[in-house]
Amino acid sequence: MKRISSALLCTLFLFTAFAFRFDDSPNQKLPSVNVKTLDGKVVNTNTFANDGKPIIIDFWATWCAPCKKELNEIMEVYPDWQAESGVKLITISIDDQRNSPKVKPYVDSKGWEFETYLDENQDLKRAMNVNNVPHTFVLNGKGEIVWQSNVYNANGGVEELHAIVNKVAKGEKPE
Amino acid sequence: MLWDLFFLALRFEKVLTENAIPVKKAFVLIPALLTGLISFLSAQTSLNNIAGGQIHGNFELTAQYYIPDSIIGADTVPEKALFNGFSNVTYTNGNFSAGIRYESYLNHLQGYPDGYKGTGIPYRYASYKNDGLEITVGSSYEQFGSGLTLRMYEERALGYDNALEGFRVRYSPHKGIYLKGVYGKQRNFMSYGAGIVRGIDGEINLNELFESRMDSVKTQFIVGGSFVSKYQVDQDPFLVLPQNVGTWSARTNIIRNKVNFFAEYAYKINDPSSSNGFIYKPGEALFSSITYSQKGFGAYLSVLRIDNFSFRSDRTAALQQLQINSLPALTKQHTYSLAAYYPFASQPNGQISWQGELNYKLKRGSKLGGKYGTDLTLNYSAAFGLDTNQLHDENGRRYSYSSKYLSIGDTLFFQDVNLEVFRKFSKTWKATFLYSHIIYNKNALEGKANYPYINADVIVADVIWHVNDKLTLRTDAEHLYVGGKKGHKEDHGNWATLLEEISLGDHYFVAVMDQWNYGNEDPDHRSHYFNVQGGFSKGTNRIVLGYGKQRQGILCVGGVCRLVPASNGFTLTITSSF
């Protein structure tokens, strides 16, 4: 019991200690981490840009069924979204060396028009504190993370994301 | 505020030491110092009126209350309840970042390795980057090439973590040149391994490096190489063991239009260890993949040959401990429960395996494709042993073996042929169907005698029905048929699974599942594994409460598989990130 209570104390401590900075910190920017393009080029995330328009960053994997459902659903309406808000969707595959060579054939066969990068050893996943996939981030025109979700909502999650992107494009708060 | 943080950091250390939590002193001091450093830096930035740093992190806890059940093999848990939890906290300010992960295993959940004990901060780092140079001290993860020589990574959910404890440097002196170096020990559960690991890796993108001259070259060339060495003192009373073991690799990646070719070859000097039965023989590994893809079509083929290539920073380590490299399993990573019933992990002592996959999209509006098109994925994989000759000394004792490079051994470890079909029928209905035929060599893979090859056929139907804006139903019906020849034991027999997942509104879900081992030879073990889960999720918070039975299963990670025992009881999981 003593052990548990001290463990709880420590956890509590960590949260209170860090809450100081958290409260007055501005919106999070994308951490600067190297990822790879599907043709092997090293790209730093600080080059991710979309001319002041919103960016969606979606973490997924070839073995993650809900991730693929969500992205394929978005693909159907992506041209409309782009026309409306100029949004760009960037997908980050966290597939490791076992499955990463399969990402390009999968993406091409689905005809995805998203920018896709490989995060083979999960450096970006860690830097962005992603627990599980799918995990979706929305960045405003300044490249700040203004919204995130770590679940695929089967009841209109894609429409919800659509509405959020449109709000962010207009400079409004997402929620 | 600066004072507050320092004060809290000191108290934190006091709390930990006074309560004699079994963590090394370093685990205590370093976070305290880090916290101090962080608060110092944040104070500096606010004084300097530079945009302040940021704190972010994530959190996950799983608590399970266990109810014994002798029929399914769920043992009595003395603590009654078990608990795993962790939280990452990361501070970033411009090019500087620092972070810790606080972990608790009080005591670890069933199925987790026993090395995870108590609480502590086994992961903490500080990192700085400037002008293409990035230096990380403390804990870090790294991968060289495809990981044949070095891959340090974590799979939190599965209890795998072989993080580097020491220094990591990454440097890009010129566009197209990427260098990496590591020097340190490896994490071994809540402490460190015995050996020291050091390695360097270089990768050159020729098109980027010679940008002006290769502008018109359509083919892209990337070459790379690595050298990794481990040191461990030899204290063996009988054997003269190499204290320094080196491994090197060379790789290339050639890309032209729709074709992407990758190959890596790695060589290791003799490295007698408990994994290979202390034989003195060099090791080799070759991994290659080629893909061809265009809109609507993708093809993939890969080959992996492994010969005596277990590489650990402690020669006596076993299972998933202290692996320096990682050998991928070239099989489909199944997501459906019964399709993953017989999994495969690469055999580091010797294996030839290959995998092929075709992705094809039947066009929208075509006769076969239907209104929305249909996606087909055909996948085949197989893994065999090497064709070897055992070598014996004059006294008849086996001391090593030789293998033929291009020849395949007689032992089939694993084979899987599967077809997956996804089709959207209407705006409200869509479905995935899977058929998989698996051959599983339980004898060789689990070391269980008297098991011949298990022939398993799995069918899955996963149907989604969007009833309305507030309600979605997902029905997942699965069946596993275990053939087995006459006179042989058919493992645990046939299984049937039915899962009904109900998504309510934007934030709630309920899932009810029954896995029924109706084909078990022993009528007393024809159990129903009934399980119900309910959850809430919003933004990055998720809370799931479950009750019921979970079948015994095999989890594979880092090239090794682990048996997770059956359990019965309540489970609470909370995840969050900020």
Image (cartoon, coloured by chain):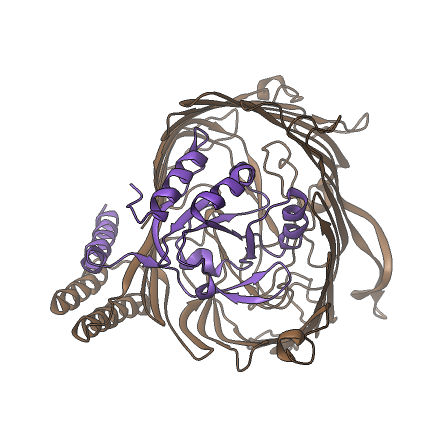
Chain colours: A purple, B brown
Q: Residue B311, how many percent across, how many down? A: 62, 66
Q: Residue at x 45, y 54 (%)?
A: B115
How many marks the image carries: the answer is: 0
Q: Residue B285, how many percent across, how many down? A: 73, 65
Specify the quadrant of the image occupied by residue B387.
Answer: bottom right
Q: Is residue B177 left or right of residue B297?
A: left
Specify the quadrant of the image occupied by residue B99.
Answer: bottom left
Specify the quadrant of the image occupied by residue B91.
Answer: bottom left
The relative height of residue B407 versus residue B366 in the rendered view (above or below) is: below
Give whichever of A163, B421 is nearer the camera.
Answer: A163
The relative height of residue A50 versus residue B454 in the rendered view (above or below) is: below
Give whichever of A65, A84 is nearer the camera.
Answer: A84
The relative height of residue A124 versus residue B230 in the rendered view (above or below) is: above
Q: Residue at x 41, y 59 (%)?
A: A127
Q: Is residue B475 visible?
A: no
Give whichever of B10, B503 is nearer the camera.
Answer: B503
Q: Residue at x 59, y 37 (%)?
A: B335
Q: Residue B353, how many percent across, how many down? A: 76, 52
Of the 4 image quadrants, the one containing the N terminus of chain B is bottom left
Query: Can you name the residue that lies furthest to the front here?
Result: A83
Q: Residue at x 36, y 72 (%)?
A: B95
Q: Is residue A164 visible?
A: yes
Q: Residue B62, how many percent across, how many down? A: 37, 41
